[in-house]
Image: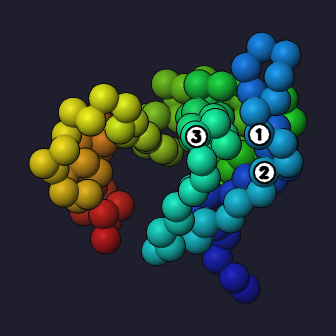
Amino acid sequence: MSEQPTLEINSLSAGYGRFDVVRDVALSVSKGEAVALLGPNGAGKTTVLRAIMGLVKQRRGLIRIGGTDVSALPTHRIARGLAAIAPEGRRLFLDQSVEDNLLLGALHLRHDRARTQTLLA
């Protein structure tokens, strides 16, 4: 039996106002995989990430993190141990390594060093 994906997105459509920015997005990420969302400005990369975090209302589709359907969860519940994003926007942390940036994103786990190390493994 294969392991359930860590992140699973099926038929995601999301956007702003009346307009969909992304339509019918599908993505599956398994434990240990690294995935990059690539595309030109305006292609919807940030919208997908914001939809995963609940910062943009999804119109259609399903988002599961670790098997939990987060489609209707508020952002604060998603950020509490399910997912986090570290927006690059203003280039505040240019001199930090990828690991340093991930550790910064895991500050809410600072009381649980073992969990932080497991997530970074």
Packing grade of label 1 (10 A; few <14, some 14-19, many >=20) is some
Height in image: 2 above or below 105?
below
Question: Does any portion of residue 52 appear in the rendered image?
Answer: no
The secondary structure type at the circle numbered 2 is strand
Determine which residue is flagged by label 2: 25
| Quarter of the image where one finds residue 74 | top right
Q: Residue at x 16, y 50 (%)?
A: 96
Label count reads 3
Height in image: 119 above or below 89?
below
Q: Residue furthest front?
A: 40
The secondary structure type at the circle numbered 1 is strand
Asked if labels 1 and 2 touch by Cβ distance under 8 angstroms, the answer is yes
- Quarter of the image with the N terminus in it: bottom right
Cα gap from disc 2 to disc 3, whole angstroms: 17 Å
Label 2 is placed on what type of residue? Val
Q: Residue 16, image x and y in percent? A: 73, 20
Determine which residue is flagged by label 3: 41
Label 1 is placed on what type of residue? Val
Cα gap from disc 3 to disc 1, whole angstroms: 13 Å
Label 3 is placed on what type of residue? Asn
> Label for residue 22?
1
Q: Residue 6, image x and y in percent? A: 58, 62
Packing grade of label 3 (10 A; few <14, some 14-19, many >=20) is few
Q: Residue furthest left?
A: 95
Question: Does any portion of residue 9 appear in the rendered image?
Answer: yes
Compare marks 2 and 3 and give the one earlier in the sequence: 2
